[in-house]
Image (spheres, helix red, strand yellow):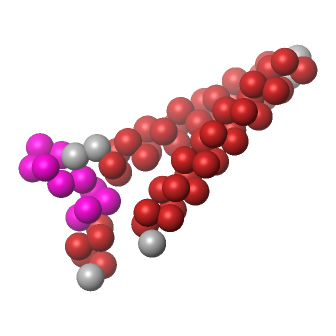
Amino acid sequence: MFDYVLSIVILAILALLAGAFFLHRRGARKQALLMVVLAVVMIANVAIWVIPTAGGDSLADAAARAGD
């Protein structure tokens, strides 16, 4: 189930970046910048969950084992 959540977050990041691009072209620079900042925060959250720790497991792996 957690894989689905990560996939939806990645799709939301892509949608935010695409929306920011179009808003920037229309002249709404402040809103576009805020959308890019939100996308960067979401990328950092996904990276925290997916990148392996020193022990070799990621937080997503640990959460999946705890749910079993």
Q: Is residue 9 above or below residue 35?
A: below
Q: Is residue 66 above or below residue 59?
A: below
Q: Quadrant of residue 66?
A: bottom left
- From which residue to which does the magenta span run? 53-62
Q: Position of residue 19 (x, y in %)?
A: 76, 34
- Horizontal placement of 16 versus 53: left or right? right
Say if the magenta span includes residue 58. yes
Tell me the chief SS of the magenta region.
loop
Q: Quadrant of the C terminus?
A: bottom left
x 18%, y 46%: residue:
53
x 64%, y 29%: residue:
36
Q: Position of residue 42 (x, y in %)?
A: 52, 42
Report the residue that reaches farthest toward the bottom: 68
x 33%, y 49%: residue:
50
Q: Quadrant of the N terminus?
A: bottom left
Q: Is residue 46 above or below residue 65?
A: above
Q: Is residue 21 above or below residue 51?
A: above
x 31%, y 59%: residue:
60
Report the residue that reaches farthest toward the left: 55
Say if the magenta span includes residue 34. no
**Nearer to me, 21 or 66:** 21
Report the residue that reaches farthest toward the right: 26
**Nearer to me, 38 or 13:** 13
Q: Position of residue 22 (x, y in %)?
A: 82, 27
Q: Position of residue 47 (x, y in %)?
A: 38, 42
